[in-house]
Image: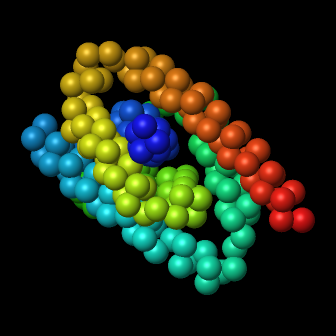
Amino acid sequence: MEILSLALTFFIVANPIGNSPTILSLLRHYPFERQRIIMFRESVISLLIALFFLFFGEMFLNALHISRYSLVLTGGIVLFLLALKMIFHSSGPAEADQTKQEPFIVPIATPMISGAGLMTVIMVNAAAEHNNIKIFFAILIAWIGVTGVLVTSPYIQKLIGRNGMAALEQIMGMILGLISMNMIVDALRLFVQTQ
């Protein structure tokens, strides 16, 4: 159950539902089959980025002498800002459609899917759990969902429309806001304990 809870958190932070309309607008000049191939490839690349931060994130933090409560507090703030962006998302015209070059790694794999929020959440949970296998399986389960949403997003958008996608993103933003507040409270508790 804990693995599924972590997987759901990673899935919400990756935000494939909220990012789908932007990604679709970036890929609208490509044939339908090519869009699906690009989305699958970018999903795999974003998974590799997430796994990199799982296995090497702690080494990076230790090298910078960053305390655990600093990481958790920063993660909570980043997630809260991300939650606000998801809740109050403006559905204006898509940006970054100036180039005809096929997107590769940037901007879809990172920062759209594996962005700063996800990297922080992975490192926070890896530091708290001390069980990389559990986090690894949670990431894999989350990415089954992320890939599924990305590859089927043209169908989902046709089914529920842009307004439906926006409503789903706002609901996920509310859940993410709750998770971020919990992280901030945990960070403050850790700070008090270490003083």
Residue 9 visible somewhere in the drawing: yes
Q: Nearer the viewer, residue 179 or 138?
A: 138
Count of labels shown?
A: 0
Q: Residue at x 69, y 73 (%)?
A: 66
Residue 68 locus on image (x, y percent): 69, 65
Position of residue 166 relative to residue 127, above or below, is above
Q: Quadrant of the N terminus?
A: top left
Q: Residue shown at 52%/64% (left/top)?
A: 130
Quarter assignment of residue 71? bottom right
Image side of residue 157 versus residue 96, left or right: left
Say which quadrant the C terminus sits in: bottom right
The image shows residue 195, relative to residue 162, as above or below, that is: below
Q: Residue furthest bottom?
A: 63
**Is residue 97 in view from this perspective?**
no
Horizontal placement of 167 versus 79: left or right? Answer: left
Q: Nearer the viewer, residue 7 or 32?
A: 7
Report the front residue among 144 and 103.
144
On the image, the x and y values in percent for residue 23 come to 33, 42
Left or right placement of residue 143 versus residue 128 in this view: left
Q: Is residue 96 positioned above or below 47 on the image?
A: above
Q: Position of residue 8 (x, y in %)?
A: 44, 38
Quarter occupied by residue 20: top left
Picture coordinates of residue 149, whole percent (x, y)? 29, 35
Residue at (50% x, 53% y) in the render: 118
Residue beneath the point at 48% across and 19% down? 167
The colour scheme of the drawn protein is: rainbow
